Amino acid sequence: MNSPLESVALFYLGPVPITSAVVVTWIIMAVLVLGSILLTRRLSVTPTACQAALEVFVEAIDGQIRDTTGAAPAPYRAFVGTLFAFILVANWSSLIPGVEPPTAQLETDAALALLVFLSIIWFGVRGRGFGGYLKVFAAPNPVMIPLNILQSITRVFSMFVRLFGNVMSGVFVIGIVASLAGLFVPIPLMALELLTGLVQAYIFAILAIVFIAATVGESKPASDEAASGQSQ
Amino acid sequence: MNIDWWTLGLQASNVLILVWLLQHFFWRPVAAVIAKRRSDTQKLLDDAAQKRVQADATLAEMEKTRAGFAAERDAILVAAKTDGERTKAQALEAARMEAETLQKAARAAIARDTATAQKASADQAATLAVDIAKRLAARLEGPAVEAAFLGWLINAIKALTPAEKQAVADGTLDLVSAQPLEPAEQTRIEKQIIAAFGTQPEITFRVDRALIAGFELRSPHFLLRNSWQADLQRISKDLRDAA
């Protein structure tokens, strides 16, 4: 087992190293996109069982966004929903033998956190204007500006570390147990990993929308601490 | 710990591309279907509400029409009752008139039948009376009856006007009797008749038992009846006329 803190390139595209996390991410992207195309090609007003399940999923995402922001979910649905779906599938990909989930690598989780950080800025500027967005850092008074700037970085960093730590530790524990105890012993741990993967994906997506809502200013009161408390 | 910035950038790009692809192929179509169903449902609800309003209006209109029907029904019933009573009165009047006509006809028929019956009874009675009289008269034969009828004949001749006597003076007279007369008796009667006429007619004697009794004088233009038969015929005619 390689160190989860190191990325091993499978091959290079010019100067760009292609790691296993990138390859698995492409496979997950292909599965998600092809699955979406297959599942949504015959949508109708009278739904099938499969379409009903899809609609329940989308309605659940919309409900979470609506409950958190108090606004219409459409502008945030694609970003938050895709984050949730990608992290969930990436976490569960650890159940396939020989596949290391991309979220168990630092770069993938850092990339996700970076996207959340940028999306907060994007939605904040779009919702409040550039000046309005900057004023967020001066709340409740200008003295808090350094702390707010630090908080905007650390809260995203904490998301990245939380996701990486949970997924990487699960994969590591399963790998160690499998190497020590045999083939079927890690199964309960893998089942637990299913739950952990689902919870982590949910937490990451919810924290993203909470941070976005806090910046845009349309959300109900929700603090980083409270949101962090959910993850523990 | 070593972060591969190329991988970090690739993964960020991958997730951004995935966001765009899923937005295009998943989130937007599913959300559109949900929105369409929601709008369709809302439209159905709106249509249902509108149709309910229309149904209420139609119901109110029907109630109004039904009330109109009730009034119209009452009017029709009143008109029908009036017509029925008028028709009943007309039928009763027609029946009464027809009954009266039938009653009159029946009365007339009864009266006619009664009259016919009375006439028939009278005729029968007259016939019976005449028959009785004939039988009785037939038993009154003899010289006295002959003499009486001869006397009545002579008186009848004498009662004739001179013009009537003159009309038969030159002709031939048949003296019809019920019984054959002896020559002597014929001579005697001829003399009395000639004396009564006062002229000299030619008299021939004939017998007709239908006379029962009596004498009659006959010529082509003269008839003097004087017999039980003539008397009975006259009586019978009088009886029938009286009936």
Image (cartoon, coloured by chain):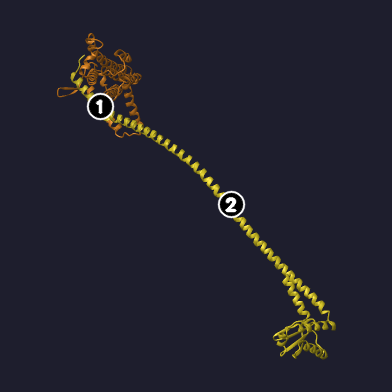
Chain colours: A orange, B yellow
Give x and y (percent) for residue B175. 76, 87
Q: In this orientation, does residue A47 appear?
A: no
Q: CA distance from mark 2 to mark 1?
A: 102 Å
Q: Residue at x 33, y 26 (%)?
A: A59
Q: Is B72 drawn above or below residue A88 in the view shown?
A: below
- Is A30 left, or right, of B193 in this rendering? left
Q: In this orientation, does residue B104 appear?
A: yes
Quick one: A207 or A215, which is closer to the camera?
A215
Q: Which circle, 2 or 1, is nearer the viewer? A: 2
Question: Answer yes or no: do the residues labelled 2 and 1 have beta carbons within 8 Å?
Answer: no
> What amino acid does circle 2 point to?
Ala
Element carrying mark 2: helix
Q: Quadrant of residue A92?
A: top left
Q: Residue farthest to the front?
A: B162
Which residue bears the numbered disc 2? B89
Q: Is A92 drawn above or below residue B214 in the view shown?
A: above
Judge the density around disc 1: few (<14), some (14-19), many (≥20) Cα neighbours within 10 Å: many
Which residue bears the numbered disc 1? A29
Give x and y (percent) for residue B134. 79, 77
Q: Residue farthest to the top?
A: A143
Q: Residue farthest to the left?
A: A14
Quick one: B6 or A212, which is closer to the camera?
A212
Q: Quadrant of residue A170?
A: top left
> Label 1 is found on which chain of the structure?
A
Query: Which quarter of the image is occupied by the C terminus of chain A?
Result: top left
> Label 2 is found on which chain of the structure?
B
Element carrying mark 1: helix
Q: Residue at x 71, y 65 (%)?
A: B114
Give x and y (percent) for residue B230. 76, 79
> What amino acid does circle 1 point to?
Met
